[in-house]
Image (cartoon, helix red, strand yellow):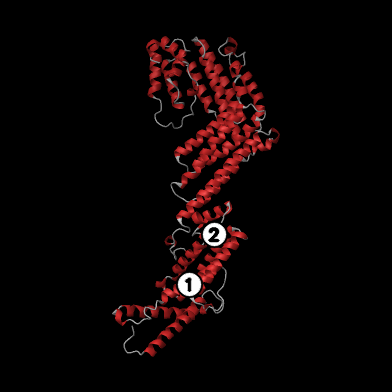
Amino acid sequence: MTEEGLSDEDQTQLHQDLDTLWTQIRAEVQKSFGPDFHEGSLRAAVKCILQQEEMDSKWLSLDPGLVPVWRPNRTLLDHNEVLGHMVQACLSQRPLQDGAGDKSEAETASAAEGELKAESEKASKQDSLDVTICRLAAQMREDLLYVQKTVSPCYPEHMNILQTYLLLYHRCFSSRLEQLANAPLDNKGLSCLLHWANHSYPREVVDPELEGKVDTDSLGPLLPTELVQTLQEQYLTFIQECLQRALKFEQELWDKPSKWSSEECSFPQLASDVLQMLVALQKVISVGPEQSQTIPVLLDSFLCRYVEAVEEFVKGNHINVASMLKAQLVCEEQFREFVLNHEIDEQKKLSCLNSLNALRDCGYCSLTSGIRSNLKEYVTGMWTGPWLDGSLPVMDSLLDFVDQKLDCLSDLKPCCAQWLLGRLHRDVALRYFKNLLKTKRRRLNEQVAGANRMTDDVNKMDAFFTKKGSDSGWVSKILLHVAEVLRLQDPDSIQLELVFLVQLCPDLSSPHVCRLLLLKSGLSTDSIRAAKCSVEENRPLGPPTNCSPPFFSHLKVKWIKVKMSQFELNTCGC
């Protein structure tokens, strides 16, 4: 259509003038990142753009039949397309050449796309992917800061030109990374892309100075969700293969006794290598409920295979089993610290801790078997006359034996030695308590003498293990309460002492109480029944607080002993 009142010649001239105006506007906009940038010229160009937009709005408000063919002129849309080509040129590190404004938009776009493709191929062959992405990110960060300080003041606030540039850079940066992601990638490249897609972007490309001035939430994901999932699956497969190789390599070391040294026992590599892999995976996988369980599932699966391998090796009675286990206990400490200090689903955490407890059990049982298997013969003298009068040093002999055997564990790392000695402390105390119960009813003077001897023995045991590094002093408190039960004769005092004992150690059972009280002569059935009922009434309910770890539950009172107790107590109901 033609505008009424204008000749064809006038219309042609007007159309040419608009083309000339656009050429001048485009030239000034393209200078925004160049050395010949002039703030006043860009302001004038932006003013012309807004005037053309206003003219478009006026014409579009009229009857369509009156609108000339060159309206709407869409100068602002063309302006934004030019910005897009400028951004592509900036991220390709190819500055706009003189005369670039004379090129058609199709030629500019084609050239930019060609440059992007060529640089992507070059980066995959020569540059590391990490260097390429970091360069692009640094360029984007620098350019956006430049736009905010230099270019943005030339535009009216309502145009929000900084946000426009941010969206254009986002699209170009995203397109570049998608091209790189679709090229052949090694594992380092996978890690780099995932780290940027899931964690670094857009934080690393937007300067803190721009905070509050741009809306980064509107950008959307850096890479398509489906592509990220594919990359994550590839990287997860790589990590799983690495974990399998790490365990296989560790098992091969176990079969080479000559390779083990005291240093290798103190500083084994397996846990460190595995945890580094998991931490690396944590840094690249996306954040979400499903992804948060990826690492716990991997670790749980690995620990199950790892413990099975250790247990199988121990069964083989290899000559280096002790050295190997010392190293694995160090690994166990490192794995345990990771599990306890990271946010892991309770079910998976419990499963991982069960595997680690099994590893501890395996190491402890093997390394201390020579001690525990001989404890019985050292406590057989309890309740004999020489023991009661102090002439038979049962505890001294036992501790001398333990001290000799502990020499072979002197190279354990302190963190491992502490819990191992603590557990051995508990087991020695259990063996002592078991022999205490395995006797007949004692007369009053024997009870008092036995309590005194027991107090001396417990104090010696506590001093010995505490000096060695045990943190299980709580077992001594339990045994001292037991000694006090033996010493006391007043039924009410005995009952009160048992209440203290069950509150300290809630796993004190009715059979244990009955068996302990059967050592004492002079107690009536009613007194024993009252003491037993008081223990049950005062047993802590719910999760124990300020209580010792389980002790009595590790010592099973045999069925026959319980039956004997029930027979002797008649109606006590034990």
* Cβ atoms at labels 1 and 2 below 8 Å apart: no
Amino acid marked by disc 2: Leu
Task: State which mark lies toward you, 1 or 2.
Answer: 2
Above/below status of 66 relative to 337: below
Residue at 38% of width from left, 19% of height from top? 533
- Residue at mark 1: 83
Residue neighbourhood size for the residue with mark 1, other residues' Cα within 10 Å, grouped as few (<14), some (14–19), many (≥20): many
Above/below status of 276 relative to 171: above
Q: Which of the marked residues, 1 or 2, is nearer the chain's N terminus?
A: 1
Q: Measured from the top left, where is residue 427 in percent x and y?
A: 55, 24
Nearer to me, 101 or 107: 107
- Splitting the image into 4 quarters, where does residue 371 fall? top right
Above/below status of 264 relative to 23: above
Instruction: Please give the count of numbered marks on the rendered protein.
Output: 2
In the picture, the disc for residue 183 is none
Task: Work out how far the residue at label 1 is from the one at label 2, CA to CA, in angstroms.
Answer: 23 Å
SS for dot 1: helix
SS for dot 2: helix
Q: Quadrant of the N terminus?
A: bottom left
Q: Quadrant of the C terminus?
A: top left
Q: Left or right: where does residue 518 sit relative to residue 390?
A: left
Nearer to me, 574 or 241: 241
Q: Measured from the top left, where is residue 382 in percent x and y?
A: 57, 14
Residue at 56% of width from left, 17% of height from top? 453
- Residue at mark 2: 180
Nearer to me, 149 or 253: 253
Q: Measured from the top left, where is residue 86 in percent x and y?
A: 51, 72
Q: Measured from the top left, where is residue 168 in percent x and y?
A: 47, 67
Q: Left or right: where does residue 85 sit relative to residue 569?
A: right
Residue 297 in view: yes
Amino acid marked by disc 1: Leu
